[in-house]
Image: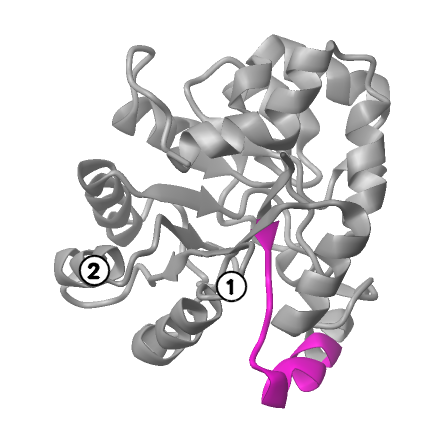
Amino acid sequence: MIIDLHTHVFPEKIAEKSIAILEKLGNQKAVIGGTVSDLIDAMKTSGVNYSVVLPVLTKPEQFESINRFTAEIGKLKGIIPFGAIHPLCENIDKLLDIIVEMGFRGVKLHPDYQETDITDEGYIKILEGCRKRGLVAVIHAGIDPAYENHVHCPPELSSEIVKELTTDKSEPFIVLAHMGGIGQIEKVERFLVGLPVFFDTSFVLDETDSTRTREIILAHGYKNICFATDSPWRDAKQYIDIVKSLKLSEEMTNSILGDNCARLLKM
């Protein structure tokens, strides 16, 4: 079983425009279209069984519309929707209860697009609420091409959050995307490797030396690594091949490609 923990889609009427804007902001091209049907077609081609769709609130007032859209596409086979919430939302506990009621298994946080440092009180409330409710929290970590001058979730800050909210004896519920931090691999090794937190592989596998990737996986613990692409920005088939090329054991490879995520999501 292969599970992609990190994908994005947009409503059909705005998908093309949204992708064009993001391509310009990030100075990169999408590898597939931005609709859920594009994602499902790519899953069939690459052999991915499930994709977790991660919506992002850039404004608190988007809570109802974005979560309604994501819940609707969650009815499709193979799609696992997460909820979206913003650190500046009012009544965070009430909104997290709504997220649970809607059937979401977790939330996506993007400190850069939300222009808020991960140590902000709003994020602490959200993460404490996720832990209490058994929700997974996937957090964009490291540099974002659109916000290179201010990294809102660098390893030195995310490590503080992990240490505050998790213990070695508790099952991790926080996922730091992009192997702990895009473009900050030295800091990831210094501040995060070995802590009780998941890394996902999105966006960085094709830009990181495979030997170093393998070393980080072994040092951090393969059971806390989840396969992810950041679709539509990265190709699932290419990423699956990269994972399989890392010269890990069959158990490690299968764990990363799907078993770890299944455990995290209680599937």
User: Is 54 covered by the magenta stretch?
Assistant: no
Q: In which quarter of the image is the N terminus?
A: top right
Q: Residue at x 65, y 10 (%)?
A: 218
Hey, what amino acid is under mark 2? Answer: Glu
Note whether 28 is above or below 117 in the view shown: below
Q: How is the image coloured?
A: one colour
Which region is colored magenta?
A: 6-20
Q: Which residue is drawn at 39% across and 46% down?
A: 118
Give the alpha-carbon distance from disc 1 to disc 2, as whole Å: 26 Å
Residue beneath disc 1: 113
Q: Residue at x 52, y 22 (%)?
A: 224
Circle nearer the N terminus (1, 2): 2
Q: Nearer the viewer, residue 51 or 123?
A: 51
Q: What element carries label 2?
A: helix
Q: Which of 1 and 4 is in front in this view?
A: 1
Measuring from the top left, give residue 262's x and y in whole percent.
48, 33
Examine the rendering and report whether any part of residue 11 can be seen.
Answer: yes
Measuring from the top left, give residue 145's x and y in whole percent.
70, 57
Measuring from the top left, give residue 32's x and y in whole percent.
79, 66
Examine the rendering and report whether any part of residue 157 can be seen.
Answer: no
Q: Quadrant of the C terminus?
A: top left
Q: Residue at x 83, y 13 (%)?
A: 247
Residue beneath disc 2: 101
Using residue 246 as the reference point, say whether residue 180 is left or right of it. Answer: left
